[in-house]
Image (tube, grey):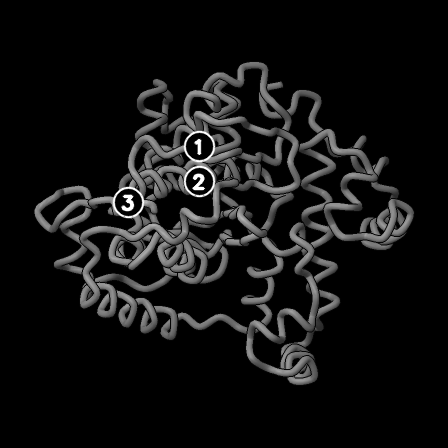
């Protein structure tokens, strides 16, 4: 039997303020944007590394007031470009890891409060999966259970964009920090997966995750025993959870997503988990496959088009940032054989995947 874990009380500064003031929360971000918590964590890390912030923002073609709190929302694409540039200038290939480590339940505002007052760790992770959009509309979290193993994955919506690998490792460090907040600081996963080439120095990753780290994976994910999901969270307040969940639902309703946007978010984490099937999505959304097709057609798209788009984005990411073979990539994307993947990629990109990899892979990839 797993024991309950005590969390901060309302008198604890790590999460108290949000509990008393959550009705004053701001709007959820629109698609492609994120709230300021990532920017604030990045600002702190860059100051510690001695970076000239004005010069860095100028070089990244961003508003010099970015770190002054003048912007409530930040483009996820622009933030990725900034993190990539900062990692290069500081010669710190694990910059995303440093930023993600600073995530706390309190820094996630309403979402963190909902997680802190969830009944079990599994409920908290499912809340993160379902409601990340109130904090961040540039990435998605997916939770899967396979027999006695749970897999928590994190995927930027544009995995081929500049800085996506840093975003992915930042997201994985964030998830680790949140699980340690819920389960205790000594919690460790069975394995951490990162979709990037291993840097020369892997010690920072070993030190933080305290578990085997597999670089060059098809997705960013934490692997841990599924029984952890049943662990109860001591001190969770049902009344607070209900009020926060209601507030989050109102925020989501005020910034609604189209079915197309919602499916893009789902497919980004599903494409490498063999869940990229219209009939499965239809079941998840409690509609028939025909109804799903009709609603997507009304929005000017189709499930196949969205699935192909997700596969293409992930394929470009894996070709550029990992050493995975064509056979491995085709299997990760659920193609029947490498030839089928090559044919599809030629149709999407106008060239063979091997040629695309050669043309788009950086000479020095992420510090390697």
Dot 2 falls on a residue whose secondary structure is loop
Of pointers 1 and 3, the one earlier in the residue sequence: 3
Q: Which residue is mark 3?
A: 3
Q: Secondary structure at mark 1?
A: helix
Disc 1 to disc 3, C-alpha distance: 51 Å
Of discs 1 and 3, which sits in the foreground? 3
Residue in the picture at 36% in, 62% down: 28
Residue at figure coordinates x 54%, y 15% from the top left: 201
Dot 2 or dot 3: first in sequence order is 3
Q: Answer whether labels 2 and 1 touch (C-beta < 8 Å).
A: yes
Image vertical order of residue 78 relative to residue 82, above or below: below
Q: Provide the residue designation for mark 2.
A: 62
Query: How far from the left and from the top, in percent, is residue 293?
Result: 69, 79
Residue bearing the label numbered 1: 58
Distance in Å between CA atoms under marks 2 and 1 = 6 Å
Residue 153, label in figure? none
Between residue 14 and residue 2, name the one nearer to us: 2
Residue in the picture at 67% in, 41% down: 317
How far across and how far down the image is residue 59, in percent?
48, 30
């Amino acid at each position: 039997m797993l024991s309950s874990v005590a969390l901060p009380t309302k008198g604890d500064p790590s999460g108290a303020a949000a509990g008393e003031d959550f009705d004053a929360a701001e709007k959820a971000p629109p698609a492609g944007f994120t709230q300021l918590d990532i920017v604030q964590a990045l600002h702190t890390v860059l100051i510690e590394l001695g970076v000239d912030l004005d010069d860095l923002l100028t070089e990244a073609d961003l508003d010099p007031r970015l770190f002054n709190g003048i912007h409530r929302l930040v483009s996820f694409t622009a933030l990725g470009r900034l993190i990539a540039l900062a990692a290069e200038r500081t010669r710190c290939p694990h910059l995303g890891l440093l930023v993600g480590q600073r995530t706390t339940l309190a820094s996630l505002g309403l979402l963190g409060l909902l997680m802190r007052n969830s009944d079990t760790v599994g409920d908290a992770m499912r809340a993160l999966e379902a409601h990340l959009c109130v904090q961040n509309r540039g990435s998605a979290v997916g939770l899967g259970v396979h027999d006695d193993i749970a897999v928590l994955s994190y995927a930027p919506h544009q995995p081929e964009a500049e800085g996506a690998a840093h975003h992915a490792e930042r997201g994985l460090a964030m998830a680790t920090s949140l699980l340690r907040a819920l389960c205790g600081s000594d919690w460790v996963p069975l394995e951490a997966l990162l979709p990037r080439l291993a840097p020369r120095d892997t010690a920072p990753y070993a030190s933080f995750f305290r578990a085997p780290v597999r670089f060059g994976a098809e997705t960013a994910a934490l692997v841990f025993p599924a029984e952890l999901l049943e662990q109860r969270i001591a001190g969770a307040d049902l009344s607070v959870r209900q009020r926060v969940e209601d507030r989050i639902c109102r925020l989501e309703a005020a910034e609604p997503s189209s079915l197309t946007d919602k499916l893009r978010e789902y497919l980004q984490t599903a494409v490498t988990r063999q869940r990229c099937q219209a009939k499965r999505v239809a079941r998840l959304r409690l509609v028939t496959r025909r109804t799903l097709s009709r609603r997507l057609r009304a929005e000017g798209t189709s499930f196949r088009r969205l699935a192909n788009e997700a596969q293409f984005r992930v394929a470009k990411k894996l070709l550029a940032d990992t050493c995975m073979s064509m056979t491995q990539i085709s299997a990760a994307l659920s193609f029947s054989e490498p030839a089928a993947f090559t044919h599809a990629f030629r149709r999407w990109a106008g060239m063979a995947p091997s040629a695309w990899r050669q043309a788009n892979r950086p000479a020095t990839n992420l510090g390697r």
